[in-house]
Image (cartoon, rainbow, N blue to C red):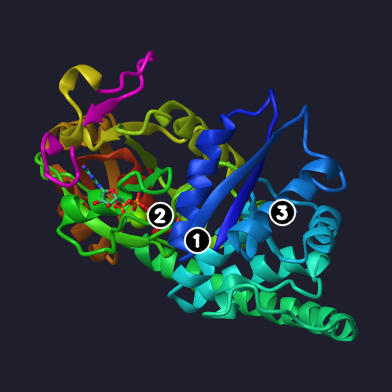
Amino acid sequence: MAILIGVDSPNADWTLSESLSELSELARTAGVTVVTRFTQSRASAHPSTYLGSGKLIELKELLHDTCANIVIADDELTPAQLRNIERALQVKILDRTGLILDIFALRARSAESQLQIELAQLTYSLPRLTRMWTHLSRLGGGVGTRGPGEKQLEVDKRQIRKRISVIKEKIDKISVQRVVQRDRRFQVPLMSAAIIGYTNAGKSTLLNRLTQSDVLAEDLLFATLDPTTRSLKLPSSDQLLITDTVGFIQKLPHQLVSSFKTTLEEVTQADLLLHVVDSTNPRWLDMVAVVNEVVAQLGAGSTPQIMVFNKIDALPEGDWPRLLGSLPHCHLSAITGQRLETLLMALDTHLASFRQLLTIRIPYQRMDIVHQFHEYGQVQSVEYESDIKMVVDINRVVGERLLSSLHHQEAYDE
Ligand SMILES: Nc1nc2c(ncn2[C@@H]2O[C@H](COP(=O)(O)OP(=O)(O)OP(=O)(O)O)[C@@H](O)[C@H]2O)c(=O)[nH]1
Ligand SMILES: [Mg+2]
């Protein structure tokens, strides 16, 4: 049973109560019951104890009265803050980052994401190891169980450092395999779109609806950790690859962003981003800002986006969110399929802007490439000269990918 604590500072982006509601959802997702919230208004968090000392005494009484055995702070605590509060309160302290890391650990399925999350957890916990410090996920039923004894700590730290370097090596090996896999995927030379958005926006539901897949979609935060890619055929019969990705959240732990770099590469590699928005959430505009911030951080800030306002089945049309700018967008319901065609049309329009007549020459020994041009484009004419000269109506990016698999001496644009 947990008490949530937070500092109400005037310069925060989100109001404290909204941020704490989200924290409460995170706690629920991790299987922790929240008994109450405890907040303090101050210009900024106290540098060494987060809350002021008088407030800590009040909190200690509250812990006693409510029998709560864990305190969760809405911000990432410094190692010193964590130690000091823990000493003052004598209960287990967790912060927003630790909680998110725990949820990721519970969700991780593939070997790769399990390693990535372990790396993020170890990096985070190294400076924070205390007598009571352990992750929820390792506690099983006994939340609040004591961690390793003081003497054990130094030994533990050494072991953790060793483990960190082992994991990094393993991740490096896996990411090499990933690049190989991605290269193999580029043998399907289609353009790719990554579904991005705030956690719980409906990304997996949308992928399932679009491609009749069965990716886990749940009313839980961070239901998806591992990317899933499917191909999608549009009404024009154009095709593209679509990847579902991990959701973002405000104050996303930076340890996660760096250890999930390879998974998040799906976002940086994509030709197009489908930015899914939960239209029913009154904070949708702030969530969009959070997502765009992470996207920029990943280096994909200039990738074109289509905004997908989801969950419109739950809102009267007059209340649908609207964008001020001219970004391509659509309103739909991933769960009912209502207005799904507006997204398909937006995708078709986007892809159509890449259509181009290409004149190419392919040597006779590369009939495989000739076949691929037939498969992915409309061949307008073929002439058999010293090599095969074709005029193809094709997506420019797809055409370039096909040509790049030839040596540049062997084929060239006219
Ligand atoms: N009413 C309504 N609910 C939806 C719609 N699409 C998704 N949901 C619900 O929203 C919740 C989250 O859906 P997911 O598809 O798991 O969301 P996600 O963005 O993949 O979430 P994470 O993987 O956790 O980041 C589920 O309970 C869905 O049933 C929709 O169009 N309308
Ligand atoms: Mg998902």
Q: Residue furthest front?
A: 65
Q: Which residue is pictured at 77% across the width and 42% down the height?
A: 55
Q: Which residue is pictured at 83% across the width and 61% down the height?
A: 83
Find residue 267 and report its horizontal and vertical position in percent.
46, 49
Return the residue at label 1.
Answer: 263
Quadrant location of the N terminus in the rendered image: bottom right
The earlier-in-sequence mark between 3 and 1 is 3
Residue density around tag 3, few if under 14, some if 14–19, many if 20 or more, within 10 Å: few
Find residue 261 and report its horizontal and vertical position in percent.
58, 58
Q: Is residue 18 magenta?
A: no
The Cα–Cα distance between marks 2 and 1, rounded to whole angstroms, is 8 Å
Find residue 29 and report its horizontal and vertical position in percent.
44, 60
Q: For mark 1, give the secondary structure.
A: helix
Quadrant location of the C terminus in the rendered image: top left
The earlier-in-sequence mark between 2 and 1 is 2
State the predominant SS element of the stretch in magenta.
loop
* Residue 123 picture quarter: bottom right
Amino acid bearing label 1: Thr
Return the residue at label 3.
Answer: 61
